[in-house]
C-alpha cells in the first residue's frame, strides 16, 4: 500500500510539472517534456514510492513478534502490524507517521508551488493580453 500510495502522490507531482510546462511554456512543451524527461519523471515517482515503502518495511523487520499474530482488521496496514510487537513501539509509530507525513508534505509543497506558478503565469498573461486587447478596441472605436 505504501509503494502504490507513495508512487501515486509523486505521479500527481509529475503531472503537475507537465501541466505547469504546458501552461507556462506552451510552444516549448514538446522540447521540454521529451520522452526521456517523461520516462525519468515516471521512474522517479516509482523510485520514490519504493524508497518510502522500503523505509516503512525496514522499521518493522527487527521487531519481535509474539502472541496472537492476528490483525483485527481486514486491511493489514503497518501501524496494525506494529501493534502486534512484544516491545514498546511508541517511537517506531512516530517514525512511521513522520515518514509518511514527510512524503505527503513534500508532495503538497511541490503541488502548491506548481499551481502558484501556473496562477501567476495565467494572471500575468491575462493582464498583458487584456491591455493589448483594450488598446486595440480603443483604436477601432476612434476610427
Image (cartoon, rainbow, N blue to C red):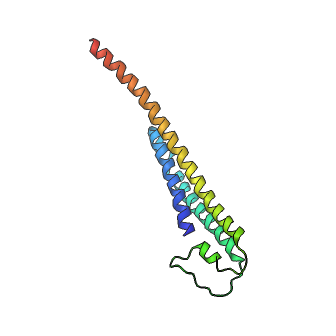
Residue 86 image position (x, y, % from top left): 71, 81
Near-viewer residue (142 or 116): 116
> Measured from the top left, where is residue 107 in percent x and y?
57, 53
Name above or below for residue 37 compared with residue 23. below
Q: Based on the displayed image, in which of its 4 quarters is residue 113 positioned?
A: top right
Position of residue 58 in the picture relative to residue 119 (left or right):
right
Q: Could you tell me residue 119's position as x and y percent?
A: 47, 38
Residue 35 visible in rendering: no
Residue 73: in sight, yes or no?
A: yes
Taking depth in this image into account, of 76 and 55 the one nearest to the observer is 76
Instruction: Give the camera-side residue of 97 and 109.
Output: 97
**Picture residue at 72% right of the left edge, 68% below the top:** 91
Q: Residue at image x 45%, y 41%?
A: 23
Which quadrant of the rendered structure holds the C terminus? top left
Q: Quadrant of residue 58?
A: bottom right
Q: Quadrant of the N terminus?
A: bottom right
Give the percent coordinates (x, y) of residue 100: 61, 62
**Quadrant of the rendered image containing residue 104:** bottom right
Amino acid at each position: 500500500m505504501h509503494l502504490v500510495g507513495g508512487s501515486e502522490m509523486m505521479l500527481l507531482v509529475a503531472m503537475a510539472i507537465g501541466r505547469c510546462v504546458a501552461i507556462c511554456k506552451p510552444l516549448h512543451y514538446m522540447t521540454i517534456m521529451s520522452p526521456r524527461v517523461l520516462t525519468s519523471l515516471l521512474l522517479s515517482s516509482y523510485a520514490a514510492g519504493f524508497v518510502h515503502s522500503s523505509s516503512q518495511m525496514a522499521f518493522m523487520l527487527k521487531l519481535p513478534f509474539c502472541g496472537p499474530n492476528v490483525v483485527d482488521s481486514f486491511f493489514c496496514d503497518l501501524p496494525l502490524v506494529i501493534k502486534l510487537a512484544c516491545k514498546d513501539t511508541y517511537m517506531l509509530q512516530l517514525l512511521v507517521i513522520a515518514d509518511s507525513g514527510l512524503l505527503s508534505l513534500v508532495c503538497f509543497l511541490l503541488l502548491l508551488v506548481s499551481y502558484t506558478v501556473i496562477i501567476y503565469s495565467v494572471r500575468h498573461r491575462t493582464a498583458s493580453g487584456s491591455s493589448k486587447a483594450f488598446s486595440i478596441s480603443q483604436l477601432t472605436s476612434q476610427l
